[in-house]
Image (spheres, rainbow, N blue to C red):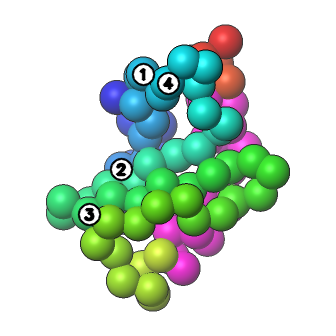
Amino acid sequence: MPVVLRRDGFRFFFYANEGHPPERPHIHVRKAGMEAKFWLEPEVQLARNDGFDSPTLRLLARMTEEAREELERAWHAYFS
């Protein structure tokens, strides 16, 4: 589970085995037993949420958008 980014107690990561073939680029975000998944392409979009409230999801979407290029580079580097 490569962690790509840590910010404000949140871990942004992807699973090493994302299926065969791998799903389109996305990132998981976890904190305190809660987890969300955001698609990175074609745009940042919530794919799944397990426990975060709406204000936190908006914050996470903004954080994901701000780090999108870094997250996409890490995804493509790992799965290439």
Give the Cα distance between marks 1 and 4.
6 Å
Question: For the N terminus, which image quadrant?
Answer: top left
30 on left or right of 65: left
In terms of depth relative to the viewer, which is nearer, 2 or 23?
Answer: 23
Residue 38 lies in what quarter of the image?
A: bottom right
Q: Earlier in the sequence, mark 4 or mark 3?
A: 4
Depth check: give the residue in front, 43 or 6.
43
Question: What residue is shown at x 67% (from left), y 36% (from top)?
Answer: 24
- Residue type (three-letter) at the residue carrying disc 4: Gly
Identify the residue position indicated by label 4 in the image: 19
Three-letter code, disc 2? Arg
Callout 3 amino acid = Met
Q: Which of the two marks, 1 or 4, is nearer to us in this view?
A: 4
Residue at which label 2 appears: 11
Q: Which residue is rendered at x = 36% and y = 83% of the image?
A: 53
Inter-mark Cα distance, 4 to 2: 21 Å
Q: Residue furthest left?
A: 32
Distance Cα–Cα, label 2 vs label 3? 11 Å
Q: Provide the major secondary structure of the magenta segment.
A: helix
How far apart are the two marked residues, 4 and 3, measured between alpha carbons? 22 Å
Within 10 angstroms of label 3, few (less than 14), some, or many (20 or more) residues?
few
Say if the magenta span includes residue 45.
no
Which of labels 2 and 3 is toward the front?
A: 3
**Residue numbers of the magenta segment:** 58-75
Q: Nearer the viewer, mark 4 or mark 3?
A: 4
**Foreground residue, 64 or 25?**
25
- Which amino acid, mark 1? Asn
The residue that disc 1 covers is 17
Any mark on residue 34, and which? 3
